[in-house]
Image: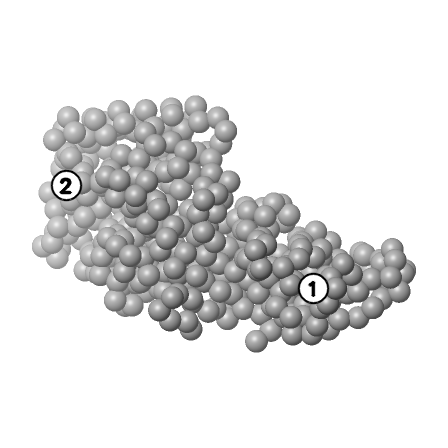
Amino acid sequence: MHNWVEINLDNLRHNFEFIRKMVHPSAVMPVVKSDAYGHGMVETAKALRDAGAEMFAVSKLGEAVRLREAGIKVPILLLSGVIDGEYEEALNRGIRPVVFTSEHLKKCQETAERYRKNFPIHIKLDTGMGRLGFRIDRINTVLSMVSTCKNVVIEGIMTHFADADSDDLSYTRLQCDLFRRAVQRFQEMNIRPRWVHASNSAATFLFPEARFNLVRPGLALYGPTFFAPQLLPVMSLKARVIQVKDVPPGSPIGYGRTFTTPERMKIATVSVGYSDGYPRALSNKGIVLIRGQRCPLVGRVSMNLITVNVSHLKEVREGDEVVLMGCQSGASIFGDDVADLAGTISYEIYCRIGTNPVKRFLSESSQS
C-alpha cells in the first residue's frame, strides 16, 4: 500500500488505564466523538470497553447508534444533545442526551410520558464557555423546571471549561467555583445526580480539584500532549518512498516552484498528500522520518505526493518506510509536533489523518 494509518490499541488501553489510576476514585468516560478523533470509533470503543470503560461520550445520535449496533451496550452520553425526531430513538436505545434548553427538557418529559419510561439525561450548565448550556444565572429557573419533570431522571450535571490548558487557571477556577455552587443548589432541592462532571483532558491533568466523580478525557486517550507527555502515541501515519533522484543546484521542486535547490540534493518522492490527511500547510515545513532520521519536506504538499530532502542519508531506496507521524528506530514525531509546524492543534491533525481510509488496528493479540 502507498500510505496507511496505524492505530495502536495497546497504547490506547495503556493511556486509559493511566488516566483511570490517576483520577481514582473518580470514574472515566472516554470521549469517542468524531470517529474517536479520527482513530476509528467502533474499534476504539471496543478496545476501551474491554479495558474496563463503563460509559462513553459522543457528539451526535448517529454516532451513538453506530456504537449500539456494534454491540456497545454501556451508557452513552450525547454531548450535543438531541434534535427533533431523535428523542424516541435516544430513549428506546438507552442513550443519554445532554440537555441545555427548556424546550429539550420539555420534549424529554413528553417522550418519557408517551413511552411510560424514565428518561435519563445530563443537565449542562454554561459557567463561562459561552456555547451550550443553561446560563448559570438562570439556575433558579432550571431548578424549577427540573422539579416538575416526573419521568426525567437527572443522571448527571455538567459544565465545560473554556481554557483549562492555559498557563493561567484563574478562569477555570472561577468556572469550577460557579459549577460547584450550582451543584450545591441542586442538592439543596434534593436533586442528587449520580454523576457530576466538568473535566476534559487538560483539566483532568492540570486541575485535579475539578475531577468531581467523573472525568471526560478525549485528546489524552490518543497520545502525548504538552500537559501529558508521559502518555503513549496511538496514531501513526506512514507511507513509502516511490522515487529517489539526484537533483542539480537551481532545480525547482513541486507546484509553484516554492523551493529551489541551493546545491546538489538527493530528493525522495513519497506517496502521501493532502488527500490522505497530511496538511498542505506543511509545505516547506514538514518533517518526516526515514531510516530513523529526520528529513525536511521541500516544496509544496500536493494531493498525493510530497518531496523530501534526503541528502544527509547514507542510503535511501524506493520502498523505504516513511513515518510522517509516529515512531521509527527510536525517533518520533508526535501529533503536537505536526500541529505546531502546521499552525493548528493536534485535535485537527488526528481528525484529518483519520480520514485516511486505510487503517491498521494493532494489538499484541491481533493485527488487521
Q: Nearer the viewer, residue 358 or 148?
A: 358
Residue 299 image position (x, y, % from top left): 76, 59
Q: Tell me the quarter of the image containing the C terminus.
A: bottom left
Residue 182, visible in the rendered structure:
yes
Residue at (82, 62) in percent of width and height: 265
Label 2 Cα crowd, 10 Å radius (few <14 / some 14-19 / many 20+) = some
Where does the image place residue 249, in percent across and percent down from the top left? 90, 61
Residue pictured at 14% horizontal, 41% vertical: 149
Q: Nearer the viewer, mark 2 or mark 1?
A: 1
Position of residue 201 relative to residue 300, above or below, is above
Residue 315 appears left or right of 359: right
**Helix, strand or loop at mark 2:** loop
Task: State how many labels appear.
Answer: 2
Q: What residue is rendered at 29% in x and 68% in y? A: 70
Contact flag, marks 2 and 1 (Cβ < 8 Å): no
Query: Marks 2/1: CA distance?
Result: 59 Å
Which is nearer the eye, 328 or 271?
A: 328
Mark carried by residue 326? none
Q: Which residue is mark 1?
A: 306
- Which amino acid lies under the numbered mark 2 shown in the image of this protein? Cys
